[in-house]
């Protein structure tokens, strides 16, 4: 029997509480559009990014590519959420759980 695990994209960070639910939804939509545009698996991108952040192992060329997609998605989410905010010194990022 195979277990099916649903991956949920979320917004976290010290300043995530400031964002409205509408802005968070916009951020998640923007990030998901990046993954779709690159035909990239969200979980594979997240795992590659975690490996990069641990810093203990070298990344393969494919993992580097997945990290770049993750960064693009994080950037898209950040800007969709914070559009119109006066400050850009904000701690908000995408996460999976």
Image (cartoon, rainbow, N blue to C red):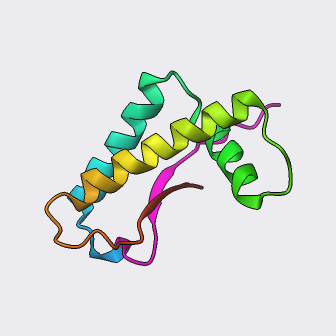
**Magenta-colored stretch includes residue 25:** no
Q: Position of residue 1 (x, y in %)?
A: 83, 31
**Can residue 25 be seen in this snapshot?**
no
Say which residue appears at 78% left-offset and 40% top-offset.
Answer: 59
Magenta region's main secondary structure?
loop
Q: Residue furthest right?
A: 57
79 vs 22, nearest the viewer? 79
Say which residue appears at 46% left-offset and 60% top-offset.
Answer: 93
Q: Residue furthest left?
A: 84
Report whether 66 appears left or right of 83. right
61 vs 48, nearest the viewer? 61
Q: Quadrant of the C terminus?
A: bottom right
Say which residue appears at 70% left-offset and 58% top-offset.
Answer: 53
**Can residue 29 be seen in this snapshot?**
yes
Q: Position of residue 94 (x, y in %)?
A: 47, 55
Q: Is residue 77 above or below residue 64?
A: below
Residues in magenta, as a range: 1-16
Q: Is residue 2 above or below residue 5?
A: above
Report whether 38 appears left or right of 2. left
24 vs 82, nearest the viewer? 82
Q: Residue 86: name its quadrant.
A: bottom left
Q: Is residue 14 above or below residue 49?
A: below
Q: How many marks?
A: 0
Q: Position of residue 35 (x, y in %)?
A: 47, 32
Report whether 59 appears left or right of 29. right
Q: Position of residue 2 (x, y in %)?
A: 79, 31
**Magenta-colored stretch includes residue 3:** yes
């Amino acid at each position: 029997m195979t277990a099916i695990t649903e991956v949920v994209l979320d917004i976290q960070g010290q300043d995530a509480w400031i964002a409205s639910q509408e802005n968070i939804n916009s951020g998640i939509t923007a990030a998901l559009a990046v993954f779709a545009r690159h035909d990239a698996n969200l979980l594979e991108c997240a795992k590659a990014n975690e490996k990069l952040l641990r810093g203990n192992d070298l990344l393969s060329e494919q993992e580097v590519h997945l990290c770049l997609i993750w960064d693009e998605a994080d950037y898209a989410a950040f800007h969709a959420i914070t559009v119109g905010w006066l400050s850009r010194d904000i701690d908000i990022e995408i996460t999976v759980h």
